[in-house]
Image (spheres, grey):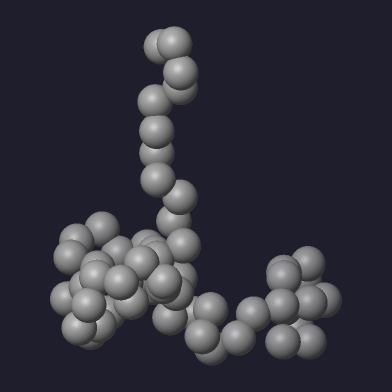
């Protein structure tokens, strides 16, 4: 963590690493993460949804 902070990265925990892995998965996130429910996948998935701009 000290090395990461010295190189300008934000603080993170092992829990953040799991969320990063779930967020970066392109396939079936639920299967890849091992969660039983989609609700748990939603908690770990931190990637923002892409939306179309209004009026476009």
The structure residue drawn at horizontal position 40% and vertical position 45%, both measured from the top left corner, is 49
The furthest residue to the top: 55
Give the image quarter of residue 19: bottom left
The structure residue drawn at horizontal position 40% and vertical position 39%, both measured from the top left corner, is 50
Number of marks drawn:
0
Check the picture and name the quadrant holding the C terminus. Answer: top left
The furthest residue to the right: 6
Q: In this picture, is 19 found above or below 45?
A: below
Percent coordinates x, y for residue 3 in the rendering: 75, 83
The structure residue drawn at horizontal position 43% and vertical position 81%, both measured from the top left corner, is 18
Check the picture and name the quadrant holding the N terminus. Answer: bottom right
From the viewer's perspective, tell me whether residue 13 is left or right of residue 40: right
Give the image quarter of residue 25: bottom left
Q: In this picture, is 10 found above or below 13?
A: above
Percent coordinates x, y for residue 51 in the rendering: 40, 33
Q: Viewer-proximal residue, 4 or 27?
A: 27
From the viewer's perspective, tell me whether residue 33 is left or right of residue 46: left
The structure residue drawn at horizontal position 45% and vertical position 22%, both measured from the top left corner, is 53
Percent coordinates x, y for residue 10 in the rendering: 72, 70
Percent coordinates x, y for residue 43 in the rendering: 41, 71
Q: In this picture, is 51 found above or below 6?
A: above
């Amino acid at each position: 963590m000290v090395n990461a902070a010295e190189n300008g990265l934000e603080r993170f925990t092992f829990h953040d690493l799991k969320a990063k892995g779930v967020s970066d998965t392109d396939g079936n996130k639920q299967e890849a993460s091992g969660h039983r429910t989609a609700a748990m996948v939603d908690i770990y998935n931190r990637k923002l949804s892409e939306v179309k701009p209004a009026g476009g």
